[in-house]
Image (cartoon, rainbow, N blue to C red):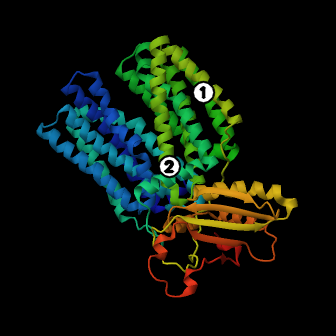
C-alpha cells in the first residue's frame, strides 16, 4: 500500500488532495449552516447538497472527454481555478453580508462544477504518477483520502462554524485548494504529444460512449457498480432516520454514525491489497455484498448505538472495498486515450445508483418504516451475489497495455483533408474452409475491437462463389477519424488482429482497400496525372502494420 507514496509526485498530490477533500466537506457544512440561518425551508436546505453534487451528474461525460482531449495537468489546474474562484467570491460576499439563498446555491454549484471537472482528470492522471504495478494501491490510497475527509471533514466543519461562523468555513475551503494548485503547477508531467489533433468535444463524448458500449468488461463493472449503488444507497439516505428513529438520538449520534461508516471505509481501503492478493475480484465483491448485507440487518434490528456503530464500521469497510475494486477494474481495463471517459462513466454509475437508491429506499421507509427498509436493503445486497453468476467481474492483475500508435499513415493518391469521408475499409482474407468456424469466432472479437476504437458499420461477409474468400468491411466518418481509429488499438488488440491475419492462407498478402465513399471533393479539380484518377488497392507486407 505504501509503494505509491514513495513516488514524490504522487505523494505531494495525494496529500494536497486530502486537504482539498477536507475543504469540500467543510464547505458543505458551512453552506448548510448558512442556509439554515437565512431560511427555514427544508427544501432550500436540502438543495445545498444537491447544488454541490449535481454537477457530477451533469458534467461527468464532458469532464471525462476533456480529461482525455487535453493535458490532464492543465485541465486540473483550470478546474481547481474555477472552484477556487467560486469559493473566494462566496467568502467575500458572505463576509460583506451580500449572500441570499439563491446566491449561495449558485456559488455551491460553481464550486461543485469545478470539482466535477477536476475529478476525471485527477483520477486518470494517477497512471502517469506511479508505475503500473503500483496503480491498484494508488487508486486505493485516493479512495482512502476521500474517506478520511468524509470521516473528519463534517466534524471539523462543525467545529469551525461553531467557533467562527460559516464565513470561516468558506475561507477555509478556499485556502485548502491552494496546496493542490501549487503541486499541480510544479508537476513536470511527461508529455506525450499525439501527432493527431484532439477530437471535438461532441465527438470525444461519442467515442467514450462507444468504447464503453463495445467493451464487455467495462460494461459488466458499470452494471455491477450501478446495482450496488442502488442497493447500498439506503445507508447514507436513511442515516439521519436511523439516528433519530431507531437510536433515539440527535445530531451528535448522527455525526457519530457517519464517522463510524467513514472509518470503516478507511479500514476497508487499507486492506484492499491483501484482499486482492488472496481473492479474485468477483469473489471479493461477493464477500463484500454478503458482509454488508449482514451488517445492514444488524443496523435494522439494533437499538443500541454502540452495536449500530460497530455494524456501520463493518458496512463501511465492505462498501468501500467493493467500490474500490470496481474503480480499479475500470482503470485497469481502459487504455490511456479513453481513461478519463471510462472513469467519468464509473462516476456517473455510482452517483446515479446512489441517487436512485436513496429515492427508492426513502419511499420504502415512508411506507414500511426505517427498520424494514434497512432490512430489505440488506437482504437485497446479499441476494445481489447471484448477479455474479451472470455478470462476472474481470480479474485484472496489471494495468492494461496502452494504445500503440502507428508511425506511418497509409499511402494515398487522392487530395484528402481531415474532414474527407466517410472512409470505407475492406479487408480480404483467404481462409481454409476447415478453419472457417474458428476464424469467424476470432472476427467477432475483432469486431468489438474495431468498434470501440472508432469503426462504424462493421460486417464480415463470405463470397458465394469462392468459399475461401472472406471480406471484413467497416467505415469511419472522416479521414481524421480513420487515422485515430488506426492509432488506438492496444498491444493486446494488435495481437488479436495478428491472430486474425494468421488465418490468411492466400499466395499474396491480405488485400486491403481504403476508399473514399463520397469522392466529390477529389474530382472537383483536374487531376495532375492519369494514374491519380484510379482507385488504388493498398497491400501490407507486414501484418503488424495494422489496418
**Residue 418 position by quadrant:** bottom left
Q: Quadrant of the C terminus?
A: bottom right
Does residue 392 appear to the left or right of 456 in the view shown?
right
Does residue 64 appear to the left or right of 537 in the view shown?
left
Q: x, y percentage for residue 442?
A: 75, 57
**Residue 133 position by quadrant:** bottom right
Name the one closer to the observer, 193 or 478: 478
Q: On the image, numbered disc 1 is attached to which residue? A: 381
Above-or-below relation of 356 to 207 = above
Name the one closer to the observer, 447 or 19: 447
Q: x, y percentage for residue 490?
A: 62, 63
Name the residue: 22% across, 31% down. Answer: 34
* Label 2 – label 1 distance at C-alpha: 24 Å
Above-or-below relation of 424 to 175 = below
**Residue sitting farthest toward the right:** 434
* Mark 2 or mark 1, earlier in chain: 2
Q: On the image, numbered disc 2 is attached to which residue? A: 343
Question: Tag 1: Cα neighbours inside 10 Å, few (<14), some, or many (≥20)?
Answer: many
Q: x, y percentage for residue 348?
A: 47, 41
Q: x, y percentage for residue 438?
A: 81, 56
Amino acid at each position: 500500500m505504501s509503494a505509491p507514496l514513495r513516488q514524490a509526485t504522487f505523494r505531494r498530490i495525494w496529500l494536497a488532495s486530502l486537504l482539498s477533500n477536507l475543504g469540500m466537506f467543510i464547505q458543505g457544512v458551512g453552506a448548510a449552516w448558512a442556509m439554515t440561518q437565512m431560511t427555514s425551508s427544508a427544501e432550500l436546505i436540502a438543495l445545498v447538497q444537491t447544488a454541490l453534487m449535481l454537477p457530477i451528474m451533469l458534467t461527468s461525460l464532458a469532464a471525462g472527454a476533456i480529461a482525455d482531449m487535453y493535458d490532464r495537468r492543465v485541465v486540473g489546474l483550470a478546474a481547481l481555478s474555477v472552484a477556487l474562484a467560486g469559493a473566494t467570491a462566496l467568502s467575500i460576499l458572505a463576509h460583506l453580508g451580500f449572500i441570499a439563498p439563491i446566491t449561495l446555491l449558485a456559488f455551491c454549484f460553481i464550486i461543485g462544477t469545478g470539482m466535477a471537472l477536476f475529478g476525471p482528470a485527477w483520477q486518470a492522471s494517477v497512471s502517469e504518477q506511479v508505475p503500473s504495478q503500483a496503480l491498484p494501491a494508488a487508486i486505493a490510497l485516493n479512495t482512502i483520502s476521500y474517506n478520511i475527509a468524509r470521516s473528519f471533514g463534517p466534524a471539523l466543519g462543525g467545529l469551525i462554524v461553531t467557533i467562527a461562523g460559516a464565513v470561516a468555513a468558506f475561507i477555509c475551503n478556499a485556502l485548502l485548494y491552494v496546496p493542490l494548485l501549487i503541486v499541480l503547477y510544479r508537476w513536470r508531467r511527461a508529455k506525450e504529444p499525439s501527432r493527431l489533433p484532439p477530437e471535438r468535444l461532441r465527438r470525444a463524448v461519442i467515442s467514450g460512449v462507444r468504447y464503453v458500449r463495445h467493451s464487455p468488461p467495462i460494461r459488466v463493472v458499470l452494471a455491477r457498480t450501478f446495482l450496488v449503488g442502488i442497493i447500498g444507497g439506503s445507508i447514507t439516505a436513511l442515516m439521519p432516520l436511523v439516528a433519530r428513529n431507531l437510536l433515539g438520538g440527535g445530531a451528535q449520534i448522527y455525526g457519530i454514525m457517519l464517522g463510524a461508516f467513514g472509518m470503516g471505509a478507511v479500514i476497508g481501503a487499507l486492506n484492499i491489497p491483501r484482499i486482492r492478493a488472496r481473492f479474485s475480484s468477483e469473489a471479493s465483491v461477493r464477500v463484500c455484498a454478503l458482509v454488508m448485507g449482514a451488517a445492514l440487518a444488524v443496523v435494522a434490528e439494533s437499538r443500541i448505538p454502540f452495536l449500530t456503530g460497530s455494524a456501520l464500521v463493518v458496512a463501511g469497510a465492505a462498501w468501500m472495498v467493493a467500490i474500490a475494486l470496481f474503480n480499479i477494474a475500470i482503470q485497469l481495463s481502459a487504455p490511456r486515450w479513453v481513461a478519463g471517459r471510462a472513469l467519468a462513466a464509473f462516476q456517473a454509475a455510482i452517483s446515479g445508483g446512489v441517487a436512485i437508491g436513496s429515492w427508492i429506499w426513502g419511499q420504502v421507509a415512508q411506507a414500511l418504516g426505517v427498520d424494514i427498509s434497512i432490512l430489505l436493503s440488506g437482504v437485497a445486497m446479499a441476494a445481489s451475489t447471484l448477479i455474479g453468476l451472470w455478470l462476472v467481474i474481470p480479474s485484472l492483475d496489471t494495468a492494461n497495455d496502452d494504445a500503440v500508435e502507428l508511425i506511418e499513415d497509409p499511402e494515398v493518391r487522392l487530395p484528402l483533408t481531415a474532414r474527407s469521408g466517410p472512409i470505407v475499409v475492406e479487408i480480404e482474407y483467404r481462409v481454409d474452409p476447415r478453419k472457417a468456424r474458428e476464424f469467424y469466432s476470432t472476427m467477432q472479437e475483432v469486431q468489438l475491437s474495431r468498434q470501440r476504437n472508432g469503426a462504424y458499420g462493421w460486417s464480415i461477409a463470405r463470397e458465394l462463389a469462392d468459399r475461401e474468400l472472406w471480406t471484413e468491411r467497416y467505415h469511419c466518418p472522416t479521414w481524421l477519424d480513420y487515422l485515430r481509429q488506426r492509432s488506438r488499438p492496444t498491444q493486446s488488440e494488435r495481437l488479436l488482429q495478428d491472430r486474425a491475419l494468421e488465418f490468411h492462407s492466400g499466395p499474396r498478402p491480405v488485400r486491403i482497400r481504403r476508399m473514399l465513399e463520397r469522392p466529390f471533393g477529389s474530382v472537383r479539380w483536374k487531376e495532375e496525372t492519369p494514374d491519380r484518377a484510379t482507385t488504388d488497392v493498398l497491400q501490407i507486407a507486414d501484418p503488424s502494420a495494422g489496418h
